[in-house]
Image (spheres, rainbow, N blue to C red):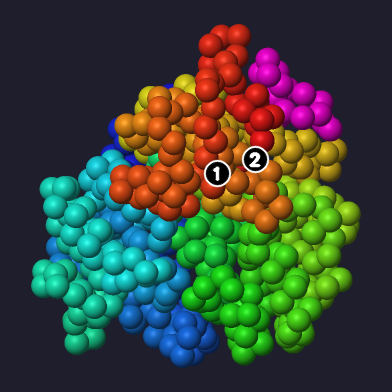
Amino acid sequence: MDAPPSREPGGAPADWPGWPAEDVQRYRAAGYWRDELLGDIPAHQAAERPHAPALVDGERRWTYAELDRDIQALSGGLHRLGFRPGDRVILQLPNKAEFVLLWFALHRLGAVPVHAMPGHRRSEIGHLARLTEAAGYVVPDRHARFDHRELAAEIRENHRTLQRVIVVGDPGGHPDFIPFDTLYGDGTGPAAPPSPRDPGDLALLLLSGGTTGTPKLIPRTHHDYAYNARTAAGICRLGPDTVYLAVLPLAFNFTLACPGILGTLMSGGTVVIAPNPDPLTAFGLIEREGVTHTAVNPPLVPYWLSEHRAHRPDLATLQLLQVGAARLPDDLARRIGPELGCRLQQVFGMAEGLLNLTSPDDPEEIVCTTQGRPISPADEIRVTGPDGRPVPDGHTGELLTRGPYTLRGYYRSPGHAATHFTDDGFYRTGDLVRRLPTGHLKVVGRVKDQINRGGEKIDATEVEDHLLAHPGVLQAAVVAVPDPALGERSVAFLVSDGAPTVRGIAAFLRDRGLAAYKAPDRVRLIDRMPLTAVGKIDKNALRALV
Ligand code: OOB
């Protein structure tokens, strides 16, 4: 049976299954797990290289000593507000330095950041608040023409445990919301008492792309997350000279730890934050800051190539462009090196753990046509056919995995154990892959009921459940269809006694508090749903209609 890894309030053993005791021992003995606490990373670097540049956001800059000082002060402020070790705190911030500062300050205190994306709304945040019994919620004042304070007020109203709202910016008409800047105090107050956390404890909660209607939470420990970031940093050869540009959302596991922000800071390098994913913004920052590494998703690649052609920026410092989160077409992959003058690295990862990277040493053909191979020698891979038996290399099957940074079960969700995990602890990724004899994986499809809209994952069941609440909708099915720009788009097939439009449906889903990116791109009305032999909605038949 799984050994409980934690006795802390944030990671009570009943909340999530950890790794079995023999695996814990094995991962520690092999040196994968090194008893690191994520909150200690800035302090370690501040001792080693206090004056080296750590973080850049626009005109604001922090050396490691300054970063560590600010994190200490913030942790003291959080403690004075009443946050305690093990408390879960929902962090919903756009790409700003405050995300990094607060993330580490929460760790210093021993609190657990719960990652929300900037686009999440009442439905998603309410679910996070309920499931985690979060003690706090951190929001920007306004972002992307949305007033997050209004949402925060509504969430707090409906969730007893969630009393403290921290606003980065202007708290507006909410006098009891806490302005971020006041957390520093006068800068001389004591830091939070040393965190009593164990590296095996719950460190953060990531939101899964989901396939079962309600978004699931992924427990990540200090041990496994630090290992994830450190190993990826090694493969990408990060060091003190690395300048990493964070283009994708900071809350995304890819940007944070693959190797991203954590891998860079663990290596003594500099993190530069891009306020938006616009290629011209990125080019400007690459030139100004001498960026060496960055990461984007496949839909951004054509924009990078065309803007590069049009503006001819000087990208001489850029060594590696990581592309992942959705399938990068081979032909697009082949253009990156010659046109941008940097190396491509394909990244096939998942919030649940397993991370695959192509290596700077891989032949060009492998880099352009595979999604990499597992970063750890302890990653166990199975590729299985519909009968659950392993298929030979080169054949398509579902990817199953187990290892030192892949979860053994979701947070507070024992009911999902049987569907998402095998009896011996392998996670069923729902991805269809082919494995080459070299161990590299090609992602060729998926068995999970999900739409990958340019890297943003949409759980079909979650959207269908909301659609069925529409008074005019009798039956609903959401499917992915190929799209030249995003890779995939979502189409909702509806049996309806009205004539709902894309806009009408989007407004309806928005009123229900669903993130806007989950609204179907197209709506098709049909007379009746095609059914399979066992009476389930036949999504293959629906896809064939498009
Ligand atoms: C990343 O994480 P998630 O949790 O948003 O999504 C994971 C899923 C995978 O199971 C797979 O279906 C898909 O996204 N995916 C890819 C892919 N990378 C992810 N499908 C095809 N090709 C790829 N290169 O998306 C994520 C996490 C860490 C690093 C990078 C991506």
Q: Give percent across and percent down for residue 321.
A: 71, 68
Position of 544 relative to 85 (above/below): above
| Front position in the image: 62 or 490 | 490
Q: Is residue 86 visible in this depiction of the protein?
A: no
- Marks 1 and 2, how far apart at CA: 10 Å
> Is ligand 1 less than 8 Å from the beta carbon at label 2?
no
Which part of the image, by quadrant, shows the N terminus? top left
Position of 160 relative to 399 (above/below): below
Q: Residue at x 49, y 38 (%)?
A: 459
- Residue that carries the numbered disc 1 in the rendered image: 522
Q: Residues within 10 Å of mark 1 (few under 14, many from 20)?
A: some
The tag earlier along the polypeptide, 1 or 2, is 2
Which part of the image, by quadrant, shows the C terminus? top right
Number of residue marks: 2
Q: Give percent across and percent down for residue 430.
A: 60, 33
Q: Give percent across and percent down for residue 47.
A: 45, 80
Q: Is residue 500 left or right of residue 173?
A: right
| Front position in the image: 38 or 499 | 499
* Badge 2 element: strand
Q: Please tell me whether residue 440 belongs to the stretch shown in magenta.
A: no
- Residue that carries the numbered disc 2 in the rendered image: 481
Q: Is residue 88 visible in this depiction of the protein?
A: yes
* Badge 1 element: strand
Disc 1 marks which amino acid? Arg
